[in-house]
Amino acid sequence: MAQSPLSTGEPAATPPGRWSGWLQVSHKSTRYLLVVVAAATLLVVAGLGWFQYRQIDSVTLATIKGQGNLIWVCSKLELQLGSYQAALRETVDQGSNPALLEETTNQYNVFVSQVQLLQSMDSNASLRTHESFQALLAAVNAYINQADLYLTDVPKHLSPQVARQLFQDSQGLLVKAHRLTMDAYHVETSLAQASLQEIRRFTLYYGITATVLIVLTLWVGWLTMRRLAMVSRLQLQHSEFLRAKKEMAEATNRAQSRFLSAASHDLRQPAHALGLFMSQLAPLPLEPPARHLVDCAQEAVHDMQSMLDGMFDLARLDGESMHSEIRPFAISDLLNALRNSYAAEASSRGLRLRVRPSRAWVQSDSVLLRRILFNLVSNAIRYTHQGSVLVACRVASDGRQVHIEVRDSGIGIAPQDHERIFQEFYQVDNPQRDRRQGLGVGLSIVQRCCRLLDLPLTLRSGLGCGSTYRLSVPLATHRPKPAAEPTGLLAAKNDLAGVGVWVIEDDVMNREALTGLLASWGCRVSVAQDLSSAQALLAQQPWPDLIISDFRLAGGLNGLEIIQRLREQAGRELAACIISGDTQPQVSQRVREAGLVLLSKPVRPAKLRGLLRHLLAPVEAVAGDGTATVD
């Protein structure tokens, strides 16, 4: 058999629609575009800036090196030649002496070193093609060859005539050295201007490129902001659209709630009166044909009431204001009520209903849990043709939960139908909508009750293998003190003969039906339509034993307020209950807060009679039970 876990939580969120998905993609693509453009712009601008910095640095270094190699070296050569000539002039003027000879030789050697430095420099390649460079080198080499004969080593004697000749020969070198210095200056100036032109050209390109990139970035940013504005506008429109849809859905829900409330009240009124009239008609002696018609009509009324209860209970469970009342209680009371309610029906179908006893206490809502188990057992009996239905209860191995199982040997459920059977009005193999198989909302009510109580529900079933529903309910952490059991007090009041009952009802048909039913039970019944007519009864009779009032009455006061006024006037808590066709949770909440019992229309006579006996019992016998809602 297949086993399916049935989710009782909230429905899964719907996937994002076309609009929301497009907006998310637009946001992502816009962010990626901004990141890519910003990164590319930063890399290009930084790369161009670094390249320009390297160009300026190289030009600066070249300028510094050019000043030290070309112009500066040529100038030093010219200056050194002048110093050498000055030493020769002193020799001519003063004659030869050792100190002067040593100075002259030193100046000559420095001059020769400067010439050699000029010849060996790599940076003078641009000067080698100049005539001044070739002329100077030729003249210098010729002069050096001549002067080496006298000044290679420090001479012991240098005649003034030789010194004069050397001086005269060096005069031509000075002119050529000066011309070379000027040519070197012009060469360096040309190189510097070319470098500066290159820097200007690159700076222009850099500025144009940076400007284009900045304009491009601003343009992309403008497009991005425009796109973001469009996306924000679409988001706002989408939000407005969703808000309008939400308001429309809420308005529809409110209209549906008003319709269900009105329909519940208006449909329950005649159904309630019809059920009471049929209950009065059933005990009367009738001929067999008439008895058959009455039995068929009573069965039809019973089916109609069951269908109304199912539909409106389904709507009530879907309401947002439906809340559960979690409290500890003994599961044995619920199991006993289950056995007493369905033993006769199971026996009439040739089935065996077995309910295993349990002493466990659970923490849950007793009314909703009762509805769950009653619906499961009723469904099991309906779809089991032979065999038995078992209700078992055992404590789980973790000691925190109680597993309640409803098993049957019925026709079973195919795996593909495990989820669909919990849909409203869905029935397996009942396309003709045979009302004898129910309305198709019992399992829907079970699922909604489980969802409200947050109880896990599982189904294990297969075709021809029966079905097993398992419900896990938390164990109670503590057990309240049991209420005192009535000892013969209820039995003393089982007979309703002579009990004074006031019926406060503004609907004539319902008032007549309820009055006739109570009178058939031997009650002394008085009727009223509102507070003034109820107070007028006091002039004719004493206070009643029990008050039964409809909730929604003509005039400014409802049935709850009228009962409170009468209790204040009587100075004591008169036994009372409310009968209403309203299914709104607010009505039930108000009645519970007032400490009264609410009977929902249509009311079955057996349930009404049992409640009257319960209310007429002494207060200590029914303590804690006077605020329940009877469905």
Image (tube, rainbow, N blue to C red):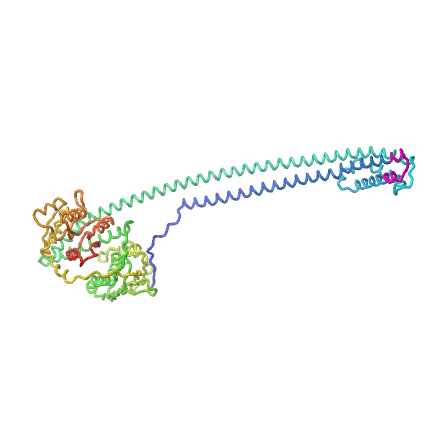
Closer to the camera, 462 or 450?
A: 450
Closer to the camera, 337 or 413?
A: 337
Horizontal side of 119 relative to 558 (left or right) equals: right
Q: Position of residue 613 (x, y in %)?
A: 15, 57
Closer to the camera, 579 or 491?
A: 491
Q: Is residue 246 magenta?
A: no
| Above or below for 191 versus 347 | above
- The quadrant in which residue 452 appears is bottom left
Q: Position of residue 58 (x, y in %)?
A: 68, 40
Q: Residue 631: in sight, yes or no?
A: no
Q: Residue 415: in sight, yes or no?
A: yes
Q: Quadrant of the C terminus?
A: bottom left
What secondary structure predominates along the stretch shown in magenta?
helix
Q: Position of residue 272 (x, y in %)?
A: 17, 51
Q: Position of residue 80 (x, y in %)?
A: 81, 37
Horizontal side of 23 relative to 268 (left or right) equals: right
| Above or below for 419 versus 102 | below
Number of marks: 0
Q: Which residues are magenta?
A: 88-104
Q: Residue at x 49, y 37 (%)?
A: 222
Horizontal side of 413 relative to 621 (left or right) equals: right
Q: Is residue 89 magenta?
A: yes
- The quadrant in which residue 333 appears is bottom left
Q: Quadrant of the N terminus?
A: bottom left
Horizontal side of 562 relative to 396 (left or right) equals: left
- The quadrant in which residue 377 appears is bottom left
